[in-house]
Image (cartoon, helix red, strand yellow):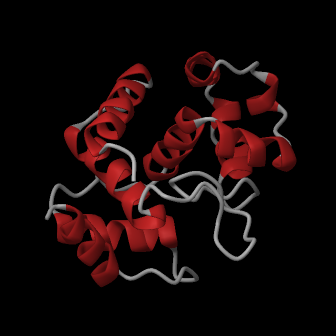
Amino acid sequence: MVDSKQVQNLIERILRKMSMYSPEAVQLVYRTGLVESHYKYLRQLGDGPARSFWQVEPGMTCCMDICINYLRYRKKLVKVVSNILYLDEKYILEPKEEEWSDILEWNIAAAIVMCRLKYRRVPKPIPKDLNGQAKYWKKYYNSDLGAGTPEKFIEVVNGSNR
């Protein structure tokens, strides 16, 4: 597992550059990576499409949807994101699933950005407590189709605090 303080510091710096920082946003993005991959896996186990510590799916269920239906309508944010990721804006404005599959696996910042944007699109504030964040993650990130549960989220987070 990578150093948790370094990951949290990186998340904080990226979220500040995006102007989407809050202590609970850093905490939720960090915890999401912890629960999704234990900061061990860059590819979904079993040959699934998800990539990065945050297990972001490059297709229309996540990354492509964010690019096409969210970022495309926020030109200033496109510039900010492309600068953070050191990517040409074409990767955001004309996204291709195969390219994003690689970008998410190779670029930690890209996965952090996409994780934060997925949560940003939720019309409810990020909870401050672990129990609230577990339910929020399940509903808005893992989804009803995902295998995760709020109880597992809490167990993993509490297990990492030992």
Where is residue 68 shown, x and y percent of the image?
74, 42
Task: State whether residue 109 is above or below residue 49.
Answer: above
- Residue at horizontal 26 percent and vertical 48 percent from the top: 27
Where is residue 108 shown, x and y percent of the image?
55, 37
- 116 horizontally vs 79: left or right: left
- 121 horizontally vs 149: left or right: right
- Residue at horizontal 32 percent and vertical 34 percent from the top: 6
Task: State whether residue 85 is above or below residue 114.
Answer: above
Q: Which of 57 and 125 is in front in this view?
A: 57
User: Would you identify the image quadrant in which residue 18 lies?
Assistant: top left
Task: State whether residue 146 is above or below residue 92.
Answer: below
Q: Nearer the viewer, residue 117 or 72?
A: 117
- 123 horizontally vs 151: left or right: right
How many marks on residues? 0
Where is residue 136 shown, x and y percent of the image?
34, 67
- Residue at horizontal 64 percent and vertical 21 percent from the top: 82
